[in-house]
Amino acid sequence: MTAQPSTSAQTGPLTGVRVIDMTAVGMGPYCTQTLGDYGADVIKIEAPDGDVFRHATPKAREAMAAPYLQLNRNKRSLVLNLRQTDDLDLLRDLIRQADVLVYNIRPQAMRKLGLDYETLAADNPKLIHCGVYGFSENGPYAGKPAFDDIIQASSGLADLQGRGRDGTPAYVSSIIADKVTGLMGVNAILAALYERTVSGQGQAVEVPMFETMVSFNLIEHMGGATFDGTPTEMGYERALSPYRKPYRTQDGFIGLLPYTSEQWKRFFEVAGRPEIMDDPKYREPGVRAQNIGELYAILETLTPQKTSDDWIALLTAADVPVTRVNTLEHLLEDPHLKAIDLIQTLPHPTEGTVTIARSPVNFSRTPTSIRRVPPTLGQHSNEIRASRKFETKETE
């Protein structure tokens, strides 16, 4: 069934907030799409060739690739050539009347264009000027180029994927640094918007990928270094165990995690091995944590004894956390996701239909919505140029 974009008035919590989006690829567009889902009016500024992700794969039509379509709903597209004075002047006009500017251009390039915070704040002191880029301007890595793979490697995330296994660093099969930093950008912008209601002033906000991912990774993996700052016993043992993984059954795999003492006890009762929990190494949480790898190894020997359906039925009845291992393809037919209409198929003027996951956030009074499907390159250029005063109300 094909849904329809919302035609009702904007009701999201950011209704009335105006965002100029000078970002491309994954991190920045994810940030600004989230703001758009929350009701903000987002104008996406694109060079004549468009966002790089427009030209990724797969795609059914040129400049409308799947990754771009998943990151750019609830936006209007305006093509500008910032080497041309008129286009740069138009951008400055838009920023002068905006609440938020988000960019992932390197700060030195923004300064060269006269789009740095100090210059723009002179005309718009309430502006939230948010840079999402590789490395903080306050350290020696300032200005270095950065993409998701570079940050996964530099932040220790690639190292973590090899620990407890063969030691070979590996990338997570997701643009996780882009997405985590994009969400951190949303958090920072919302905090700055709230503070503005108190002070009446905007501010510059910096959300660097490297520092964001280092902070993210060290939450559980600071380990022993927490206590004296020396790099000893770093890493969270449970997460790094080579036996922490989906477990093979007679006919597939399950995700399984007994966590509390009672859950471990009930699991081994269901598995027909209740005596295992009599072992002093596993009985108490503090000691069990030191031997968690051994317990996970035991799980691996037991799960092949039953089918996935059998385990899920038995462990669900015993209130032990368990799930089938879904493939990406399974998610499109998942009954829970269908019931809440998370994954929606929407009509699109050039693509026929597009299937995208809506915002997972539910507000009781100010719901998120999909009001605009991802735009074609420059789709709203004429509309925005014709209304240079940047009307408060979006034109449809």
Image: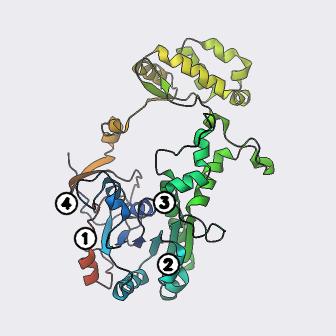
Quadrant containing the N terminus in the rendered view: top left
> What residue does disc 1 label?
379
Q: Could you tell me which secondary element the residue under label 3 belongs to?
A: helix
Looking at the image, tell me whether mark 2 or mark 4 is earlier in sequence order: 2
> What residue does disc 4 label?
350
Identity, as a three-letter code, of the amino acid under mark 1: Gln
Identity, as a three-letter code, of the amino acid under mark 3: Gly
* Location of residue 250 (image quadrant): top left
Instruction: Count the labels in the image.
Output: 4
Q: Is residue 223 above or below residue 296?
A: below
Q: CA distance from mark 3 to mark 1?
A: 24 Å
Closest to the camera, between mark 2 and mark 1, is: 2
Q: Are marks 3 and 2 in contact (CB under 8 Å)?
A: no
Give me the residue at 39% from left, 84% from top: 88
Looking at the image, tell me whether mark 3 or mark 4 is earlier in sequence order: 3
Closest to the camera, between mark 3 and mark 2, is: 2
Q: Are marks 1 and 4 in contact (CB under 8 Å)?
A: no
Looking at the image, tell me whether mark 3 or mark 1 is earlier in sequence order: 3
Looking at the image, tell me whether mark 1 or mark 4 is earlier in sequence order: 4
Give me the residue at 50% from left, 75% from top: 128
Left or right: 317 with respect to 46? right
